[in-house]
Image (cartoon, grey):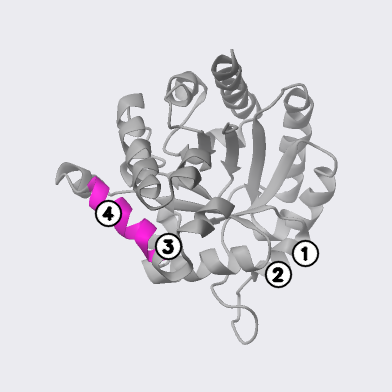
Amino acid sequence: MRVKLVAGNWKMNGSLASSQALIKAVLPPLAALGRARYAVCAPFPQLTTLAQALRGANVALGAQDLCPFENGAYTGGVSGAMLADCGCRYVIVGHSERRSVFGDTDETVALKFGQALRHGLTPILCVGELLTEREAGVTESVVARQLDAVVQRWGWDTLGRSVVAYEPVWAIGTGKTATPQQAQAAHAFIRGRVAAAIRGLAEGLLILYGGSVKASNAAQLFAMPDVDGGLIGAASLVADEFVAICRAAQGAEETVRI
């Protein structure tokens, strides 16, 4: 049975002091929650310090990106080995902001995915369409292309060591959110595409929703049968909001298990 995962993506926000304060605020209430899993993906300079703060907690540490190459003359790059050494468990690859602002191609994302696996990290593979692509009715072909870039290089079975995050680009940081039904349709498409290759893999694959998730809509989104949690942006920077979203995931877990 799949277990809900809520991962905060802090993006380029917060000082070390404010991030430590945020962790201090969320750990006690999250420690009281049960079976669902939780993570925070912090900026590179904060990872080592936050790893210490999270030691023994039920919140895992993640990074927001990594270099597509192993090591060497890549000024400014941060390798998968470095992230693992910092104590990271997860790393986001292919976020729409990396694709649109920094020029990551499907091929680059695939290389990053492979580097994450090479160093024992769980990649959170982001896929999703632009508003123009949704309006043109090509959401599924866009998502399929982004998935295929990874599996054609590394094989379908590698998805079993990853998490997929469906993030409609038009809903990221805009305040717009896909309806639960829209999210479910996209998640069901992803799971179905994986199932066509390896059915058992699809049944266990975690597929998160990201795109203006907040406390007020998390429960409805997480109640969808193929939505296995969320990749949370702005709301993960507010302790009460993030905790409420995590509680919604735990509530969805308990509902499934009853």
Q: CA distance from mark 3 to mark 4?
A: 15 Å
Residue type marked 4: Val
Q: Position of residue 25 (x, y in %)?
A: 75, 30
Q: Which residue is mark 1?
A: 85
Residue type marked 1: Asp
In the rendered structure, are the residues bearing label 3 and label 4 in contact, judged by CB atoms less than 8 Å apart?
Answer: no
In the rendered structure, are the residues bearing label 1 and label 2 in contact, judged by CB atoms less than 8 Å apart?
Answer: yes
Q: CA distance from mark 1 to mark 4?
A: 34 Å
Q: Earlier in the sequence, mark 1 or mark 3?
A: 1
Q: Which residues are magenta?
A: 139-150
Residue type marked 3: Val
Residue 146: within the magenta?
yes
Q: Earlier in the sequence, mark 3 or mark 2?
A: 2
What element does badge 3 sit on? helix
Q: CA distance from mark 1 to mark 3?
A: 27 Å
Q: Is residue 3 above or below residue 153?
A: above
Q: Is residue 170 above or below residue 247?
A: below
Name the quarter where the N terminus is drawn.
top right
* Of residues 120 and 102, the one drawn nearer to the viewer in this rendering: 120
Q: Earlier in the sequence, mark 1 or mark 4?
A: 1
Question: Badge 1, how many Cα within 10 Å: few under 14, some, many 20+?
Answer: few
Residue shown at 73% from the left, 62% from the top = 84
What element does badge 1 sit on? helix
In the rendered structure, are the residues bearing label 1 and label 4 in contact, judged by CB atoms less than 8 Å apart?
Answer: no
Looking at the image, residue 42 sits to the left or right of residue 12; the answer is right
Q: Position of residue 190 (x, y in %)?
A: 37, 44
Residue shown at 48% from the left, 53% from the top = 125
What element does badge 2 sit on? helix
Q: CA distance from mark 3 to mark 2?
A: 22 Å
Q: Earlier in the sequence, mark 4 or mark 2?
A: 2
Label ID, residue 81: 2
